[in-house]
Amino acid sequence: HWGGEGKDNSRTPSLCLIHRLDHIVMTVKRLKDTTMFYSKILGMEVMTSEKALCFGDQKFNLHEMGKEYEPKATHLVPGSLDICLITKMHLEEMVQCLKACDIIEEGPVPRTGAKEPIMSIYLRDPDGNLIEGSQLYFLMMECCLIFIPPNWFD
């Protein structure tokens, strides 16, 4: 495994070998609670007898604590995930949907995304994972079109 500091890493590839993210494994306390939250609140599709959640081209594989598959991460702890998910829905619509559930912890707030600025809201799933729901926003100076997210100046 990677040696880190003090190890000879001179044979490390100099180019990025990764193309995209396929799936993430989440360690959860109870599969049923997790699948209910992500399917009912965030609209993800439950797959393979509650052991996976699909959205877009991505997937969350769910491993119930104490019943994990091999190989697995070294330190398994439910509630240790902090992830940002991009919505196609207008963020204000998402806020209105989630207000009924009373689960918004923070936001909307401006943040820096992987490729461009985003507006985000934060909530927690049943295990305490921090879920950031975000919408991309654009400043397109060439054509003088400016999209400013709702409540940007609030």
Image (spheres, grey):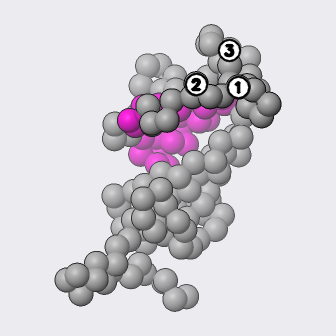
Element assignment for label 1: loop
Q: Taking 7 as reference, is 118 above or below it?
A: below
Mark number, residue 8: 1
Contact between marks 2 and 1 (CB within 8 A): the answer is yes
The kind of residue tagged 2 is Arg
Asked whether, in this view, residue 67 is left or right of residue 140, the answer is right
Give the residues in magenta: 18-46
Q: Which residue is mark 3?
A: 67
Element assignment for label 2: loop
Crowd rating for badge 3 (residues with CA inside 10 Å; few <14, some 14–19, many 20+): few
The kind of residue tagged 1 is Asp
- Residue 136 position, x and y percent, is 39, 65
Q: Earlier in the sequence, mark 3 or mark 1?
A: 1
Q: Is residue 31 visible?
A: no
Q: State the residue in front, 9 or 140.
A: 9
The kind of residue tagged 3 is Lys
Q: State the residue in front, 70 or 79.
A: 70
- Residue 61 position, x and y percent, is 52, 26
